[in-house]
Image (spheres, rainbow, N blue to C red):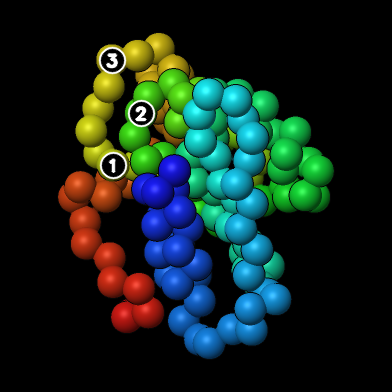
Amino acid sequence: MKRIALLCLALAVALTARPIAAQQLEIHFLNVGQGDAAIVQEGGHTAIIDAGPSGISAFLTTFHIDTIDLVVASHPHADHIGGMPELLQSHVVRFYLDNGIPHTTGIYRRTLALHSKIGRMPHSLSKSRYTAGVQ
């Protein structure tokens, strides 16, 4: 859970290149059972960190989210990406980021297959360096 909290904080900083009032930033830690998922919203932008084992689309519907600017998969275990295929099929995802470590599970292969189908492959953090707020 510490890792998710740190990722949320880093994303909140990355999504805002200017100072914001505290009431504009919303972070929702979702109860997805055995797994992790979080929604970070700021100024009309939405980021998702992990998708839990399943059911994340229902949460997104509750928050009236149909387009996601950034999806981050912290690692390819089912308790973190089990809901990714559902998410990728039901919502517009502008950018997908993973840690670049391949996995042999069916859920990982289904997630990659959906990226291929929609014409976007995941971008790997292990191959790039990002600095928040610098262009």
Circles 2, 3 touching at the beta carbon (< 8 Å): no
The disc label shown at residue 99, or none:
1
Q: Image quarter for residue 69? A: bottom right
Q: Amino acid at mark 3?
A: Thr
Residue sitting at x 70%, y 76%:
23
The disc label shown at residue 76, or none:
2
As drawn, is 13 to the left or to the right of 135? right
Q: Residue 30 or 78: which is nearer the viewer?
A: 30
Q: Is residue 10 above or below residue 94?
A: below
Q: Is residue 15 above or below residue 4?
A: below
Q: Residue 75, can we see it?
A: yes
Q: Image quarter for residue 14? A: bottom left
Q: Label 3: which residue?
A: 104
Q: Image quarter for residue 104? A: top left
Q: Earlier in the sequence, mark 2 or mark 1?
A: 2
Residue sitting at x 68%, y 67%:
44
Q: Is residue 95 above or below residue 90?
A: below
**Where, quadrant-wise, is the C terminus in this rendering?**
bottom left
Circles 3, 1 touching at the beta carbon (< 8 Å): no
Secondary structure under badge 3? loop
Label 2: few (<14), some (14–19) or many (≥20) C-alpha neighbours in 10 Å: many
Q: Residue 118 or 47: which is nearer the viewer?
A: 47
